[in-house]
Image (tube, rainbow, N blue to C red):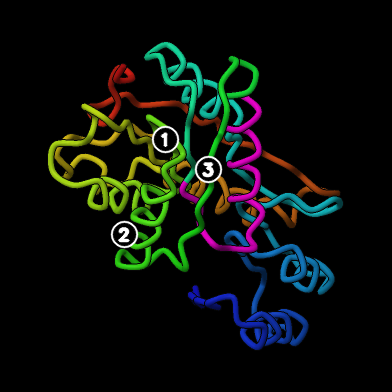
Amino acid sequence: MILLDSGSDEKWVSSLSSMLRGGVLAGAIAYAPTEPEARILADTGFSVVLADIELEGSTSIRFDFSEGAKQAAGHLADLGHTRIAYLAASSERETYRLRLQAFSQEVAARGGQVVAIEHSASLEFDDAVGAGARLLALGAGFSAVMCDDDLLAAAMVKAAGVGRVPSSLSVIGVGDIELSRMLTPELTTVELSAAAMGSGAIDLILESGENAGAVQLSIPSKLIVRGSTGPASR
């Protein structure tokens, strides 16, 4: 097994494509590539499993964020939150765009509104804290923040300051990584099982030689309620 971190650098994607075409590798699992990157790899004609992105005609496994978004929006609505902000990852990856889209639609279906969106320059913690501070400075009157990622949610809690979460601001993350239970309060988050994604991708790549045609699998998501969400302050 060879592990490559492309860092979204096209030269690494091209290198991996060349390795596949040259027969150096039997196949590849590509996690959350952009659509152009996914097409480059899919066009090699070799066994490629796309993880957390779906491309017509290709074998893929992805998180289904719809149920998690529905549960998160419903949880906030039940707590009285109608004006909600969104702290987004600054990324071209499809997975983040779909998270924002699904959550916004579910909030609207419950009579609420996503009133402000701020993008972090990266998933680096300091960048994310700065994005959280900019979001708070907008003065948009929101009482809850949905975040693209648990690290962004942790940064949002940091930017809000001691004692504000959840008394005056509710925060939800995505991922349920170990960090989510290290915070005080512990983080309410939409679980995306990395273990299920990894094992599913391995199964697909091992079975790819036996199966004809493309296979698409999805992994469900669910909300885990902890201490970072509470009733909307009046």
Q: Marks 1/3: CA distance?
A: 24 Å
Region rendered in magenta: 87-106
On the image, the x and y values in percent for residue 142 come to 42, 33
Quadrant housing residue 49? bottom right
Contact? badges 2 and 1 (CB < 8 Å): no
Label 3 element class: strand
Q: Decide whether residue 88 is among the magenta residues.
A: yes
In-image side of 14 versus 164 (left or right): right
Tell me which numbered mark, 3 or 2, is placed earlier along the sequence.
3
In-image side of 88 versus 191 (left or right): right
In-image side of 59 versus 157 (left or right): right
Q: Residue at x 58, y 32 (%)?
A: 103
| Residue wearing tag 2 | 129
Tell me which numbered mark, 1 or 3, is placed earlier along the sequence.
3
Label 2: few (<14), some (14–19) or many (≥20) C-alpha neighbours in 10 Å: many
On the image, the x and y values in percent for residue 76 come to 42, 21
Q: Which mark is residue 116?
A: 3
Label 1: few (<14), some (14–19) or many (≥20) C-alpha neighbours in 10 Å: many
Three-letter code for the amino acid on which mark 3 is drawn: Ala
Judge by depth and name the residue closer to the eye, 30 or 11: 11
Tell me which numbered mark, 2 or 1, is placed earlier along the sequence.
2
